[in-house]
Image (cartoon, rainbow, N blue to C red):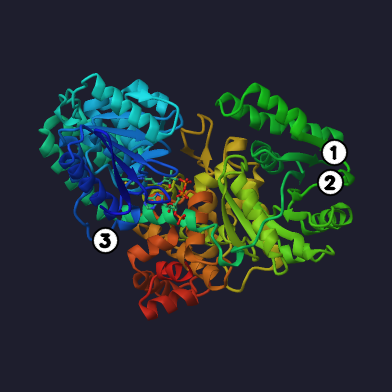
Amino acid sequence: MTDAITYELMGDIAILAANNPPVNALGYDVRIGLVQGIERAEQDGARAVLIYGEGATFFAGADIREFGLPPKEPFLPDVCTRIESSPLIVVSALHGTALGGGLEIALGSHYRIAVPSARMGLPEVLIGVMPGAGGTQRLPRLVGIDKSLDIITSGRQIGAGEALELGIIDRVQDGAPREIGLAYARELLDMGAPRRAISEMPAPAPVDFDALYDATLKKSRGQLAPAVAVRGVQASVELPFAEGMKRERELFRELMETDQRQGMIHAFFAERQVGKLPELKGVAPRPLADIGVIGGGTMGAGIATSALLSGLNVTMLEMSPEAAEAAKGRIAGNLSGALKRGKISQAKFDDLTEKALSLTTSYDDLSQVDLVIEAVYEDMEVKKKVFTQLDAVCKPGAVLASNTSYLNIDEIAAMTSRPGDVIGLHFFSPAHVMKLLEIVVADKTAPEVTATGFALGKRMGKVSVRAGVCDGFIGNRILSIYRTAADHMILDGATPYQIDAALEEFGFAMGPYAVGDLAGLDIGWAVRKRKRAEGLPEGARDFTYADKLCEGGNFGQKTGKGYYDYAAGARARVPNPDVIPFIEADRAALGITPRDFTSDEIVRRYMASMVNESAKVVGEGIARRPLDVDVTLLYGYGFPRYRGGPLKWADMVGLPGLLADIREWAETDPNFWQPAPLLEQLVAEGRTFDDLNKESA
Ligand code: COA
């Protein structure tokens, strides 16, 4: 026996307890322990076996850290089959999260009991694979095709109540998993319950699997795993059980070899790594109970909503009582969304809007808050005034945060007598929905202030990324470059519609021009005006077509027209016929003869510009690690998760090829295509961005 599974014989019931913290992942030691435990129970003359997990959870799945390494026997499907084929009655008692291989172990058992809070699911598609230990063969026999496909292709977790209703588990009972499991096994033995193997149950009736495959592929926007999982379920219907298991394994192995699997597992670990910063080790955050929000527009109201939902008291400061009431209306509107979706009760809604939220027009009312977030108009002079006032009224130790999306936090901090307390907290709109939070650490920001930013992000359920000070921080700085690459392609002959289509095909939820229409074209217009006023870099290519759209009052979806015409609704995106003539006028004025672009070239240029700027951001220390950039793009910019993030994608397609492209394009536009020193260095040393992630871990 291994330490990961302990064995105990209690009368005629053998107990196999998993001890593999933190989540009892089914690594080699656990798998071998389970097989040996079953053998020993049989040898010891036990009549039943109980399997349960010590600590926080039943098995939360296969050990993802073993993925990509040579597999070691016993393989998980064989472990499940060994459990199921035992002549003893095998009971699994579930608590915590019985996911993936964990649920498959339970399905290999003959009876399943769970505590009410237990959650279960087959989330393999979320890490780019599919169930590989009988999940696609046993679950359909238990719950039918529709339900099993819903669970397997979505990867969603279901609660114990739903699992009981579906027949995935036999009983829900409160108590310690060991105690309820033992009592259930005793009861089954006493009543002479039969051994019950799901593999021996009849297969469900056939359905049109080709149609289901196509529909699933379409829905998952290029991600393969959910569709391939449909083929696994198909095997449960068309093949005898043992053959179906083999087919499932083949499909699982195919997915294991894909870049998509690598990308999704990278995303899984990167989002867990992103909040772990060496500089914050052992640094305690300051306490947070009351926060202030300055400015109740869309952004401020979203931040306030998120803060209220995370249990903080919020004081909202506005310029006038009317504006404060309007802010409250926005917050109540946001919260009523949570109410409608059943996330909060009416009583909670009333509590948050009437008790936890207070309105004010006086800075004096911010004197006792623990943290204040300014979300006023993006103008340095306005921000400076706000911070001067905060410095005058806030208690010592209060964290003073700006939600600016590009302004220099060092300059803002310099307006106060306490620059160590000043930090950037860059939320993304709508702030109560979007998961990304950039925590912008200025020159003088104290470590515990940074730690407080991360603590706030965690409390709000955000994915927080540390960023340094520069124009646009991590995300918006990189965005402005790849947007420019797209704009250049338009000048040279592509259309916004071709570019959107190529990038949506690549896996982005929306192409950049559709995103522009959604966010509001006036934002980019303001940025272009500011940059022109500051003076464009020498040799920069400028254009007017986007300005002309805005000058005509076309700001995108909110005005009904932008790059697209939304007269028939947002979904029916129809190109706005005014756009191409504006573009043609620019080309004529610049003396450009338009050329054709393939989708492949569009993606290559767009992605190369993104990777190059990302490498600059990492090289300059604005992002500490490549994974910080990946997480930023995944959570704030609709980057397809199955490609892992721009720098993981770059590693997978190969850095030398990307650099060669950039060097080639630099010959015609040396101003825009300047290779990042870090990219050149990695290519010269034959290393990858992920090597840098590993070195920093
Ligand atoms: N294999 C290896 N390590 C795993 C793991 C797995 N299946 N699941 C979680 N971990 C690790 C995490 O990386 C994390 O490690 P760290 O502390 O070094 O960062 C630790 O376990 C705790 O996980 P975390 O996600 O931070 O805890 P949580 O309580 O928020 O969530 C789970 C727990 C199990 C719900 C979540 O980790 C999860 O969804 N895991 C993946 C489950 C899965 O996909 N299983 C199917 C695999 S085939």
Q: In this picture, is 107 found above or below 584?
A: above
How far apart are the alpha carbons under marks 3 and 2?
A: 55 Å
Q: Determine whether the residue tagged by mark 1 lies in a helix, strand or loop.
A: strand
Give the residue type that dot 1 points to. Answer: Thr
Q: Residues within 10 Å of mark 3 (few under 14, many from 20)?
A: few
- Residue located 34% across and 46% down the image: 18
- Residue located 26% across and 49% down the image: 33
Which residue is labeled 1 in the image?
A: 360
Give the residue type that dot 2 points to. Answer: Leu
Question: Farthest front residue?
Answer: 11
Q: Residues within 10 Å of mark 1 (few under 14, many from 20)?
A: many
Coordinates of residue 190 in the picture (x, y in percent) = 25, 21
Q: Determine whether the residue tagged by mark 2 lies in a helix, strand or loop.
A: helix
Residue 222 shows in the view = no
| Residue 69 - label | 3
Q: Nearer the viewer, mark 3 or mark 2?
A: 3
Which residue is labeled 2 in the image?
A: 366
Q: Determine whether the residue tagged by mark 3 lies in a helix, strand or loop.
A: loop
How far apart are the alpha carbons under marks 1 and 3?
A: 59 Å
Q: Nearer the viewer, mark 2 or mark 1?
A: 2
